Amino acid sequence: MKCGSLLNFFVSFATSQTNNMAVTLDDKTVAELRNLADRLRIDSIRATNASKSGHPTSCASMAEIMSCLFFRVMKYKLSEPRDKSSDRFILSKGHAAPILYAAWAEAGLFPVEDIMNLRKLDSDLEGHPTPRLNFVDVATGSLGQGLSVACGMAYVGKHFDKASYRTYCLIGDGESAEGSIWEALHFAGHYRLDNLCAIFDINRLGQSEPTSLQHNMEVYRKRLEAFGFHAIVVDGHDVEELCKAFDEASATVGRPTAILAKTFKGYKFPTISDELDWHGKPLGAKADEVIRAIEQQMQPGTATGAPKILEPLNDAPVVDIDDVRLSTPPAYKMGEMIATRFAYGTALAKLAEHNPRVIALDGDTKNSTYSDRIKKVSAERYIECFIAEQNLVGVAIGAGCRNRTIPYVSTFAAFFTRAFDQLRMGAISQTNITCVGSHAGVSIGEDGPSQMALEDLAMFRAIPGATVFYPSDAVSCERAAELAGKTKGICFIRTSRPNTAVIYENEQVFSAGKGHVVRSHDQDDLVIVGAGVTLHEALKASDMLMEAGIKAAVIDPFTIKPIDHDLLVKEATRCNGRVLTVEDHYPEGGLGEAVASTLAEQRNVIVKILAVREVPRSGPPEVLLEHFGIGAKAIAEAAKKLVAL
């Protein structure tokens, strides 16, 4: 028997064994789980009524799922909700936050009465979960993103931590239409993440109308099986069926499990259950009536205190993600022609040599971004995410949760635009990842506009708390990669395709928010600010201008966000208030606007912005730079006009 066939045999055998498992719950446990589910329903009703907003019907459909998960299945520490060895839970359908809060409150993490502060300004119990809460790993609510994050967590648990913790992700049926969910399903199936359990709350109703599949459970099952999941269809309001399915999931080897729970929106709410037009609405005057109806169905005599919580095994290793540095310093010769994308690959390998928790993720561009150079250090620390950029970023966010890894995620800079929502939510999630985008601007040449990142600086500058690096040579690129790994929040490093000259000594010190004057003279007439390829064009232009009797200083900002305010003010003042910026980017949101913004309150300063001002086309890089007004000749002509003002 061939190895592949043998593996499939064992997977099939293990699955067949789990399918025949008889899970027996005693009557007391069943009654307690049912009552806990009803307590979660009532808590959700009261919390949303107190805030006069929220989604009680969406909470009601998943009450039994949450009861079984939190009080029968998951292993976690109340004393440290984000403990390294605890099971992970991601509520992808973030609008059901009230029942998540209720579950932790009923478990005993905080008083149940506190959930009455839902959605208040001075409360961290927000309308959708955020990591302001110590039991939330990532912000959810922009639908379709939770499963990718869960995949990242599960991948780390299986391949890096090699620990027993499991990852659970609860997904709404409406959001399952999102392409990011499909990308994540493919990833989980491909990597056989058998420590991952995806739970689909299939309650039939969306916000404005029924979902496309409604309760067609067979279609859901076939789709999940097609992605390589062990798919289990259950009555989502039957705690015995749910517990059996969760036990089956934990015993399934070689593939992830999907529990497809048929539920009803507003379950146990008289006249409301399975009815449209109740999405996102508190029950108002109906609340007391509904609560009484639920209480009448609860079984008396069961425990009413905090339920017993299963303790996790303490088997996740202690790791250090703070010690981030290059194993050896940059080693280049002045004037040597090296593309910054290549220098990034070199830096990544050096960082990985020094810290075993540095990992790389890419979307099938690793031989262009040079992220594949980490494989020379450790092939296991590279994660191929294929051409699925939303999932690429989501997996990186998950991999970085609970300080387990230091993720570097790379692709062509233009393709990060597909994942902007993941990045936006990553900022809310207090995410620490480094994104590295290569092939920026018209300087990539013949590949044409579809491959040219011309919006990426604007996109990453718009993300709160982000740091945007734009290195101009190999030395600064290596240091940017090192600094990014130490910097909290989302970092972006913009790398270039063309070879550019090394302009810094290997010993040069770099810091975020600190630029460098790379050329100056006595009594400069203007200062030119460039970055990446345009810094080198600015240096050429400075030589041309000197021949014409005009002295031009040149600044390398190194980071576009934060930008070096003090340096720019100082040089603008010294250079007669004449500032020329040049960037391989559209004018909106790029280098020019960053410089103009920081100099806006300075008197007698004029900022002229050179940028790509139309949709570009294919052509040789040097031709395109001049054609779109950002090459050395164009810079020199613009400088002459600026000085003459």
Image (spheres, rainbow, N blue to C red):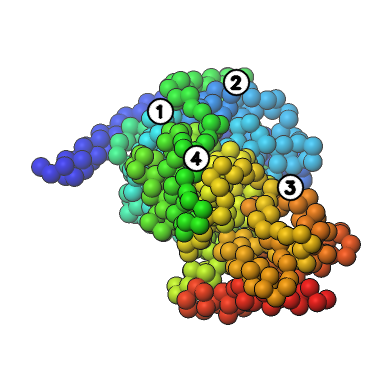
Q: Position of residue 300 (x, y in %)?
A: 59, 23
Q: Nearer the viewer, residue 306 or 548?
A: 548
Residue marked by disc 1: 163
Left or right: residue 404 versus residue 637 is: left
Q: Looking at the picture, which amino acid does disc 3 mark?
A: Ser
Residue marked by disc 3: 53
Which of discs 4 and 2 lies nearer the camera? The answer is 4
Q: Residue at x 20, y 40 (%)?
A: 7
Q: Looking at the picture, which amino acid does disc 2 mark?
A: Ser
> Is residue 226 visible to the viewer in this orientation of the structure?
yes
Give the crowd class for mark 3: few <14, some 14-19, many >=20 residues within 10 Å: some
Mark 1 or mark 4, earlier in chain? 1
Q: Looking at the picture, which amino acid does disc 4 mark?
A: Pro
Residue marked by disc 2: 79
Give the crowd class for mark 4: few <14, some 14-19, many >=20 residues within 10 Å: some
Residue marked by disc 4: 329
Which of discs 2 and 3 lies nearer the camera? The answer is 2
Q: Residue furthest left?
A: 1
Give SS at disc 3: loop
In the image, residue 384 above or below residue 580: above
In the image, residue 308 above or below residue 94: above
